[in-house]
Image (cartoon, rainbow, N blue to C red):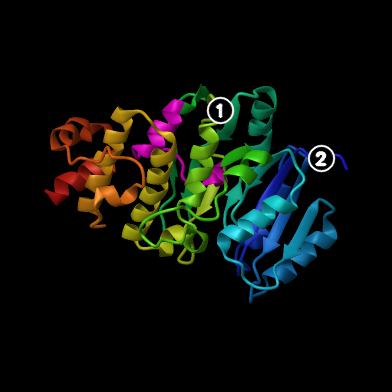
Amino acid sequence: MTKLKVSILIPTYNSERYIEETIESALSQTYKDFEIIIVDNASSDKTWEIMQKYAQEYNNIKIFRNEENIGPIRNWMRCIEEASGEYGKILWSDDLIKKTFLEQTVDILAKNRDVGFVLTPAILFGDISKEKIFYTITKKSGIYCTTSFIEGVLLDKDYPSSPACGLFRLKDLKKNLLLKIPNRFDSDASIHAIGNDLLIYLLTAKDYKKFAYVNEPLALFRAHDKSISTSTQKTKMVLNYDIAKAYFVDNFIDNVQLIRKFNALLWLHNKVFKTNQDISKFYFNNKEYKKDFVFLIKHLFTFDAYIKRAFRKFF
């Protein structure tokens, strides 16, 4: 069977409030060579009935349902396994994409084999948040070195954690979505799904020289009381993303200066968000975790503004 160019992947669970709008945003794409894969993780509401209605009407929508809830990450993985496209676009079941998302991203990957992924800024919207644009990593669209992306992510610059504002090759999603993240904190990322998303970017970035950026907000993230980012305590979010970043540093980074900057940020997070964890606990192999306060102060102002504000407030 001839592969479809793009697979839009929609993992879902109890999403009856938003799933129709999400599917409609996928169907509205001006780039037409795509399939939509929706996997329902044993919802108890009307999500499955809504999915069936769309699958009956549109031939390019394929729906699947787990007999029991298999957890968020396994459900993401099933979406990828059921897909047949060359490229993969993750779309959370409460989010949206603008109609030109695929049109403005697919050709970049198709024409540039050394580009690992294409990303765009995102618009945060919803009843519990004022609308704002984030993930604006630069003012100019273009192709950039992945070394700058990796450093930007590790040092808390305004780089994405959610793959829902990116387009990837499907083979890279299969390879780089980890079920669990090894750690010393008894933290099971297969259940809370915090950090696995970020590692898709980092693990893909290490395998490519470049990434592409389209400076137009083509992804829309909905803020509501049931979303992971909204319902999860800030300290837990920070700790688990730090665990994911530390896993990447521990296994793939040998730049001592970058490691020391990252450790300074770990120390700062411990203080500001009161995660109360010794830096050495984040690692299995890395020994560059001295409490180098001179280095911390020197590099503090390379961190994002919210960290600087938090630092000043704490002290």
For the residues labelled 1 and 2, say whether their Cβ atoms are less than 8 Å apart: no
In the image, residue 149 lies at what x, y percent?
45, 31
Q: In this view, does 55 lie above or below 299?
A: below
Task: Name the outermost residue toward the left.
Answer: 315
Q: Which residue is drawn at 68% across and 34% down?
A: 103
**Which element is circle 2 on?**
loop
Q: Position of residue 126 (x, y in %)?
A: 48, 57
- Residue at image position (48%, 66%) is 226
Amino acid carrying label 1: it is Tyr
Where are the magenta residues, as a range? 147-165
311, 132: nearer the viewer: 311
Residue 44, quarter of the rendered image: bottom right
Residue toward you, 304 or 100? 304
Q: What is the total number of numbered labels drawn onto the structure image? A: 2
The kind of residue tagged 2 is Lys
Q: Can residue 22 be seen in this view?
A: no
* Residue 126: in magenta span: no
Q: Name the residue tied to disc 2.
A: 3
Which numbered dot is residue 218? none
Mark 2 crowd level (few <14, some 14–19, many ≥20, 10 Å Cα): some
Badge nearest the viewer, 1 or 2? 1
* Circle number at residue 208: 1
Q: Which residue appears farthest toward the bottom when viewing the image?
A: 44
N-term mark: 1 or 2: 2
Q: Quadrant of residue 69?
A: bottom right
* Residue at disc 1, secondary structure: loop
Residue 230 sits in which quadrant?
Answer: bottom left
Q: Residue furthest toward the right?
A: 1
Q: Is residue 91 left or right of residue 62?
A: left
Residue 141 vs 266, above or below: the answer is above
